[in-house]
Image (cartoon, helix red, strand yellow):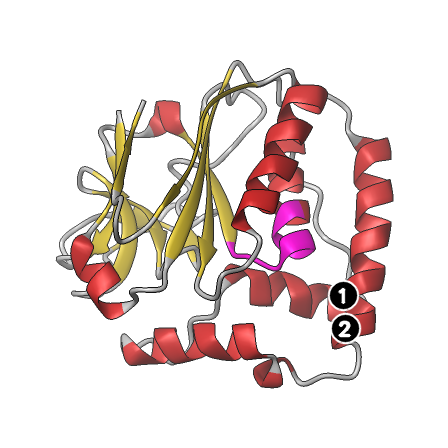
Amino acid sequence: MEFRVDKRIFERIPELQIGVLILENIDNTKNIDDFFKQEYGEITQAIMEKYGMMNLADEPRIAKWRKIYKSFGEKKARSSVEALIKRVKNGNELYRISPLVDLYNLASLKFELPCGSEDLSKMPSDLELTFATGEEEFILLGQTEMEHPNEEEIVYKSGNMIVCRNFNYRESDKTKIDSATKKAIFIFEDIDNGNLEGALTFVSNSVKHLLEANVVKKEIITNEKTNLDW
């Protein structure tokens, strides 16, 4: 199987880096409550100290993501990490979904990078980050109605199925992580030389220790290396 990034995206965002983990033999029924509570407590304290009195639009990394979305004509879309930071900043707890989802939310907050994870066994073919034709099919997480992306919208897609819209802004119900997930891909998006390696290592160590998963691949996609096979 292959994950690849359309070179036209790097032409528009040359600084973009995509951190990728391929996981197998996941036990997504494990109890990670103690680990989650400890990490979440430390992370939320750090987030509040940094962002508590700040307008999120003034934070350089968040502002840069907004500028990128706007450059592609997406005025309302926001990076997934902005939504998480905003939730914590407003004093709201993160939803606990499943161990694997909880871990990528922790990692996203801890390293302040947009992150998503999808069930590889639910994908019909290779995964690609590219521009939509507008004819692909998408079902929003938690919904049943099929819709189509905008033409030239940046999407993750597998065949004709959209996995995520506007980078990691909106996730598909079709490839969501659930308790039966055994094979998954983790994707971090970085636009300003953040700690991608640290984020990948944190998740890699966590899933091996807590979920007994095998890490098949751990790599960073750049404009010089635009694909990953496994």
- The answer to whether mark 1 and mark 2 are in CB contact below 8 A is yes
Q: Is the magenta stretch mostly helix, strand or loop?
A: helix
Q: Quadrant of residue 31?
A: top right
Residue 1, magenta (yes or no): no
Crowding around mark 2 (Cα neighbors within 10 Å: few <14, some 14 to 19, many 20+) is few
Q: Where is residue 53 in the image (x, y as percent from the top left)?
A: 78, 83
Left or right: 218 in relation to 73? right
Q: Residue at x 54, y 59 (%)?
A: 194
Quadrant occupied by the N terminus:
top left
Q: Which residue is drawn at 25% across and 49% down?
A: 224
Assign a secondary structure to mark 2.
helix
Assign a secondary structure to mark 1.
helix
Q: Position of residue 209 (x, y in %)?
A: 71, 21
Instruction: Name the amino acid type tagged 2.
Output: Lys
Q: Which residue is drawn at 13% across and 57% down?
A: 133
Where is mark 1, residue-wise?
47
Q: Where is residue 144 in the image (x, y as percent from the top left)?
A: 38, 45
Instruction: Name the amino acid type tagged 1.
Output: Ile
Crowding around mark 1 (Cα neighbors within 10 Å: few <14, some 14 to 19, many 20+) is some
Residue 109, magenta (yes or no): yes
Where is mark 2, residue-wise?
50
**Region rendered in magenta:** 107-114
Left or right: 10 in relation to 134? right
Q: Position of residue 107 (x, y in %)?
A: 64, 46
